[in-house]
Image (tube, rainbow, N blue to C red):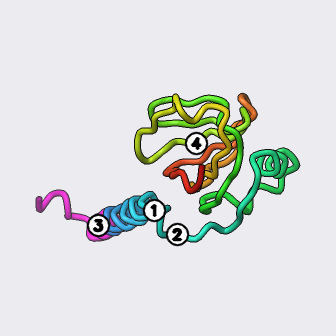
Amino acid sequence: MKIFFQHKKTGRRLISLVILMGIYGYLVYQKENIDVASTISVESLSAQEMLWRFQVNEGDDFLNQVVSVTGTVTAAGDSSLLLNNSIYCMMDTPVSGEGLNLETVTIKGRCLGYYQPQKQVQLDHCIIEDH
């Protein structure tokens, strides 16, 4: 240990780096934990309007924000829903997609952004508000 801290500047820099990495990790961890159910949506949109906003580069206002999106369920999996073939929703709890196909629902979730290859807006931590 004495050899490691032989140069005081190196030791201080190393300790500072470890502390900064710890703070950064804590902040990233805290940002990921979001309670969508108790958070108020910044805006309520239709699925078509949400997709259009991202396609004309006006969707950046929604990144990492909780939004409510209304649309028709076009596909459903164990833990995901697809609204109007354009809004991919990763649900917090498993959903029974059989009864939801072609129903109009309102989904509340955190917006992750626009995925260009599939032309879809992605939401995570989603819950069903109304159907």
**Image height of 74 relative to 45, above or below:** above
* Quarter of the rendering occupied by the N terminus: bottom left
**Mark 2 or mark 4, which has the lower sequence index?**
2
Residue in the foreground of this view, choosing between 41 and 20: 41
Q: Which mark is residue 131?
A: none
Say what amino acid the circle numbered 2 marks. Answer: Thr
Q: Mark 3 points at which residue?
A: 15
Is label 2 in contact with label 1 (beta carbons under 8 Å)?
Answer: yes
| Labels 1, 4: front one | 4
The residue segment tinted magenta is: 1-15
Q: Mark 1 points at which residue?
A: 34
Q: Name the residue under label 2.
A: 39
Q: In this view, does 62 lie to the left or right of 36?
A: right
Residue 104 lies, in percent from the top left, at 68, 44
Q: Which mark is residue 89?
A: 4
**Image height of 30 relative to 46, above or below:** below
